[in-house]
Image (cartoon, rainbow, N blue to C red):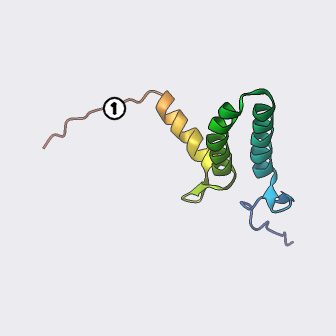
Amino acid sequence: MQFNVPQFLEVEDKIVGPLTLKQFGYLGGTGAILFFLYQYAEFWLFMLASIPLTLFALALAFLKINGRPFITILGASINYIIKGRMFIWKKNRI
């Protein structure tokens, strides 16, 4: 009996045009935040916040470091900073 083995498991489906659902969520969520900032905040605050938020959303959506998504790298970095580390020293006996 033969079974079809799924190929390309790491490729996500393109849901919204050329974007995956995650990418669209990151960009759409940031767009909504920027829209509310534009409506309810002073213009200088909107301009000050829009550049870093846009760059962060673009990094979440498109940046890959060593083939891994930026959100994975970001989570690992935060986990490394927050969790304690234990350094064990063993004296080498020569």
In the rendered image, the residue lying farthest to the front is 43
Q: Is residue 88 left or right of residue 10?
A: left
Q: Where is residue 64 drawn, in percent x and y? A: 60, 56
**30, 4: nearer the viewer:** 30
Who's the residue at 59% across and 39% down the image? 75
Above or below, comparing residue 3 to residue 37 in the picture = below
Using the rendered view, name the quadrant where residue 49 is placed: top right
Q: Where is residue 15 drawn, in percent x and y? A: 86, 57
Who's the residue at 74% across and 62% down the image? 11
Q: Is residue 81 left or right of residue 91?
A: right
In the rendered image, the residue lying farthest to the left is 94
Question: The C terminus appears in which quarter of the rendering?
Answer: top left
Amino acid type at mark 1? Phe
Q: Where is residue 36 drawn, in percent x and y? A: 80, 32
Labels in figure, total: 1
Who's the residue at 83% across and 70% down the image? 4
Who's the residue at 74% across and 27% down the image? 41
Secondary structure category for the residue under label 1: loop
Q: Where is residue 8 drawn, in percent x and y? A: 74, 66
Question: The N terminus appears in which quarter of the rendering?
Answer: bottom right
**63, 13: nearer the viewer:** 63
**65, 84: nearer the viewer:** 65
Above or below, comparing residue 93 to residue 83 in the picture = below
Q: In the rendered image, which residue does mark 1 sit on?
A: 87
Q: Residues within 10 Å of mark 1 (few under 14, many from 20)?
A: few
